Image: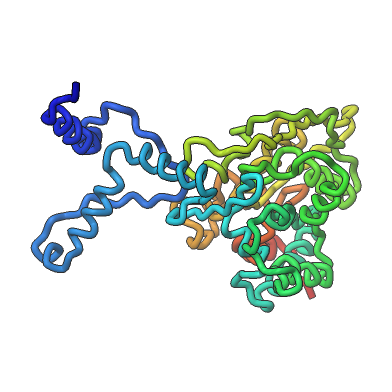
């Protein structure tokens, strides 16, 4: 027996009304979406705005952002494209590139690997000279210095990029990283090059150096680079630091939320992203310390790649209590706001007094953004150091 036509019409109308009802009453928890999002404000209704069409476009944007079941709909649509056509969302603000074996990359890292960037030669040279000048100024105060380059996933694992997505090696221009390295060598900057270190580790280790669904390095590869950095700091300071090593390396089939191992996959905003071959190394990290290892007062200016090394350093107690880890310009004013002269302008409670009394300073920059080294910190620190009596580099 067929259901009455009125019942079918009623069900259809109910389905049409459900998003609006959800928008008004929120009787089902909304599903969150990941990534950069600018929330549109509720537009004011004015005669001028109506006649110019501004109200209509703003109202549409606001309605699209607040409609009920938006997260459910977006994730379902993205899952269909991902599962059936292996497509990543094309309208996302944080563009994601989906490679072989469901390997996730960011558009920024892939473009940088393909030699597409905005860094001029004079900008890279200025950055290299600024690093050397800061290194010399800190050395006058007995402070060790490292410029640590964290690697790009696209540069370490280019073999998983989609076919034809980047130019052949013979046609690909040099990256900003490749162009700046000779400048750093000529200037004599103390560099710990995570790219080179992980290329060597990749050749001899069976363990993944980047999580398949993550943008950032994993705990295993970060610890390998951190160990080299610690050795270099010990050499400069002339004192033994704690020796970081792997007591064992196990493997898991699930990503770690603490270490951002699915941050790239999360940007796809689908219900499930994964591959049967995905494995995640879990290093059992220890330090060899008989009680005589020096724990330096460390200041690090870094980007998001420094989060995993921070957790390693803090978990193992590798530094002095007054050490500081900060993202320069990570303040309400945004990254373009200039750093003030007052101590309280330093973020996360790190004052200029901490800069001037640090045993060691590390500036960490990810490979694609190498020309932004220090994000203005170098110039501000040099000004402070000169006020403290440090002579400029001849």
- In this view, the residue farthest toward the left is 47
Left or right: 271 in relation to 393? left
247 displayed left or right of 313: right
* Residue placed most toward the observer, 349 or 83: 83
Count of numbered labels shown in the rendering: 0
- Residue 373 visible (yes or no): no
Q: Quadrant of residue 212?
A: top right
**Position in image of residue 290 (x %, y %):** 90, 27
Residue 266 left/right relative to 125: left
Residue depicted at 63% across the width and 60% down the height:
110
- The quarter of the rendered structure image containing the C terminus is bottom right
Residue 222 vertical position relative to residue 14 in the rendered view, above or below: below
Q: Nearer the viewer, residue 134 or 232?
A: 232
Q: Residue at x 72, y 52 (%)?
A: 157
Q: Position of residue 26 (x, y in %)?
A: 26, 30
Is 21 rendered above or below residue 394? above
Give how far across and how far down residue 316 sits, in percent: 75, 31
Q: Is residue 109 visible?
A: yes
Residue at 61%, 69% in the rendered image: 117
Figure quadrant of residue 80 = top left
Residue at the extreme top: 1
Q: To which quarter of the image does residue 256 belong?
A: top right
Of residues 22 and 355, the one drawn nearer to the viewer in this rendering = 22
The image shows residue 186, relative to residue 277, as above or below, that is below
List x then y, in percent, for residue 30: 35, 33
Image: 283 above or below 191: above
In the image, what residue occupies the spot 45% across and 50% down? 36
> Which of the image's four quarters has the N terminus?
top left
């Amino acid at each position: 027996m067929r259901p009455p036509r009125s019942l079918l019409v009623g069900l259809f109308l109910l389905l049409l009304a459900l998003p609006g009802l959800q928008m008004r009453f929120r009787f089902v928890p909304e599903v969150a979406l990941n990534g950069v999002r600018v929330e549109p404000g509720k537009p004011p209704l004015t005669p001028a705005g109506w006649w110019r069409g501004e109200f209509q476009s703003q109202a549409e944007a606001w309605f699209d952002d607040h409609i009920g079941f938006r997260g459910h709909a977006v994730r379902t649509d993205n899952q269909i494209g991902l599962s059936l056509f292996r497509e990543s969302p094309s309208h996302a603000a944080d563009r994601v590139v989906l490679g072989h074996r469901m390997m996730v990359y960011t558009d920024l890292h892939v473009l940088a690997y393909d030699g597409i960037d905005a860094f001029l030669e004079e900008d890279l040279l200025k950055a290299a000279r600024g690093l050397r000048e800061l290194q010399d100024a800190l050395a006058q105060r007995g402070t060790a210095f490292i410029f640590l380059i964290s690697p790009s996933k696209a540069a370490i694992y280019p073999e998983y990029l989609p076919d034809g997505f980047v130019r052949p090696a013979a046609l690909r221009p040099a990256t900003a990283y490749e162009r700046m390295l000779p400048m750093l060598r000529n200037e004599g900057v103390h560099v710990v090059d995570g790219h080179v270190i992980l290329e060597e580790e990749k050749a001899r280790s069976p363990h993944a150096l980047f999580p398949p669904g993550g943008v950032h390095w994993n705990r295993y590869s970060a610890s390998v680079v951190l160990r080299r950095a610690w050795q270099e700091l010990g050499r400069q300071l002339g004192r033994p630091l704690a020796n970081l090593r792997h007591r064992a390396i196990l493997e898991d089939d699930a990503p770690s939320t603490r270490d951002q191992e699915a941050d790239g996959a999360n940007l796809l905003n689908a219900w499930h992203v994964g591959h049967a071959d995905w494995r995640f190394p879990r290093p059992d990290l220890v330090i060899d310390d008989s009680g005589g290892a020096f724990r330096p007062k460390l200041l690090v200016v870094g980007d998001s790649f420094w989060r995993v090394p921070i957790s390693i350093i803090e978990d193992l107690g590798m530094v002095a209590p007054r050490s500081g880890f900060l993202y320069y310009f990570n303040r309400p004013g945004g990254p373009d706001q200039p750093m003030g002269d007052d101590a309280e302008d330093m973020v996360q409670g790190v004052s200029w007094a901490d800069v001037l009394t640090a045993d060691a300073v590390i500036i960490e920059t990810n490979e694609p953004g190498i020309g932004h080294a220090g994000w203005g910190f170098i110039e501000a620190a040099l000004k402070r150091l000169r006020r403290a009596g440090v002579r400029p580099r001849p």
